[in-house]
Amino acid sequence: MAASGYSDLREKLKSMTPHRDEQKNKYVDRTSNGRGKGRKRKFRESDDDDYDHSDDSAELREQEAGRVKSSIQQKSIFTPEECALIEEKIDDVVAKGEAGLYREHTVDRAPLRNKYFFGEGYTYGAQLEKRGPGQERLYRKGEVDEIPNWVHELVIKRLVSSGVIPEGFVNSAVINDYQPGGCIVSHVDPLHIFARPIVSVSFFSDSALCFGCRFQFKPIRVSEPVFVLPVRRGSVTVLSGYAADDITHCIRPQDIKERRAVIILRKTRPDAPRLDADTPLSSSPVERPIPLKAKRSHRRADPDAAHRPRVLEMDKEENRHPSLSRHGRHSASSENYWRRGQDSNKHRDSSGRKVKMRRH
C-alpha cells in the first residue's frame, strides 16, 4: 500500500478473518454440478486482496451474490414515528459526545463519520499495538459507557418482540453517525470478538450496504460490489453465515447522500480477548501524540467542520510529491485511514519544511 492512498485493505481483512489462514492458495470449484470439474476460482487468503473478481465470469459473480443474499435477513419494523423518536435520542448522544460527557473510548471520530461505543468497545486499525490476524481486543470493563436505557427500551425490546433476536442477546451497541459522503471501508466484523448474527437498524435516511468491494484513495474509489443491499430508514438488517463471515461489507461514499445513522447490535463472545491492566494502548492519552489530542478537541468543538476540504488538501499535497506514492507504502487497514492521512501535515515544522519521521 502506498502513501498516495491506494489500499487493498489486506491488513484489515487479515485481522478480521483469522479463520481463513488455513485456506491459503486453495482452489474452490464454482461449477453448477459441484463435482470439481470445470472452471475454478482461486480462494484467496485473507491477507491478499479481499476478493479478486476481475477474472470471474458474470455467472460466478451471480452465484456469489446469491450466497450473500441467502445469508441476509431484512425486516421493516420501525414506523416513521418510532424512527423520529429514536433519531432524537441519537441527536442527544451526539450532543453529549460533543460536550465531552462520555468516557474516552466511547467516542471515536473520523472525517464524515463518528462512532459511539456502548456496553463493549474494542481496539482496531490504528489503535492496535500489533497488527495481524485476530489482534483486536475488547477494552477493559468500564472504559466505555453502558448501553443507554433508550436503546434497550426503544430498539432492543422491539427487536426481541419481533423475533429478530433472543432476549439478553445484545451486550454491545454501536451508533455510527454518517455525514453525506461518509463511509466505512470493507471489513468483516472480528470473528474472535463477536458472535453471530450481526444486527443493524438504519435511521435518518435510506442508504445501501455493499459486499465484496475494494477501496482506493486519493481520490477515493470503490470497485464494483458483488452485491448491493438497499437499507431503508427504519429497516433491520441481520447478517449471518456467508454474508457475515466470508465476504467483506462496506458503506460507500456515494451511498450516503444525506445524514444517516445506524445502530449496530452485537454480542461479544465469552472468550473474546480483552486488554489487561498492563497492556499499553496506542490510543491512550499517554501513547497518543499531543497534536492528535488537540485535533480531536477541535472536532468536538466544531462537529460540522468541513472535512471534505481537508481530504482534498491531501490530494493536492500528493500531487506536489508524486514520488511518495511509489516509495511511502504503509498500511491502510483501519476504518480510521482517512484520519491518519489527515495527520500528514503534522510532520512539517513551522517553516513549512517537511520533517522526516520514522514509522513504527
Image: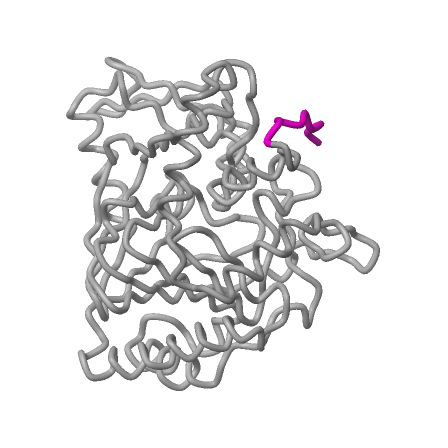
Give the dominant element type of the magenta stretch: helix, strand or loop: loop
Instruction: Work out whether 244 lies above or below 82.
Output: above
Indicate yes or no whether the magenta region holds residue 277: no
Quadrant location of the C terminus?
top right
In x, y percent, where is residue 97?
A: 51, 72
Q: Residue at x 22, y 74 (%)?
A: 77
- Colour scheme employed for the rendering of this structure: one colour
> Residue at 47% across / 45% down in the picture?
335
Who's the residue at 35% across and 54% down the image? 239
Residue 187, placed above or below residue 109 = above
Image height of 16 relative to 265, above or below: above
Residue 36: x and y in percent read: 31, 18
Name the side, left or right, on which 271 lies relative to 67: right
Numbered range of the magenta stretch: 352-360
Of all residues, the one furthest to the front in this rendering is: 351
Q: Position of residue 245 (x, y in %)?
A: 42, 44
Residue toward you, 34 or 151: 151
Is residue 358 shown in magenta? Answer: yes
Q: Could you say which is closer to the camera, residue 264 or residue 184?
A: 184
Q: Which residue sits at x=47%, y=64%?
A: 266
Camera-nearest residue between 303 and 328: 303
Residue 323 vs residue 61, the one in the foreground? 323
- Quarter-of-image position of residue 270: bottom right
**In the drawing, does residue 46 fall left or right of residue 101?**
left
Q: Position of residue 50 (x, y in %)?
A: 41, 30
With respect to residue 113, does 36 lie above or below?
above
Q: How many marks?
A: 0
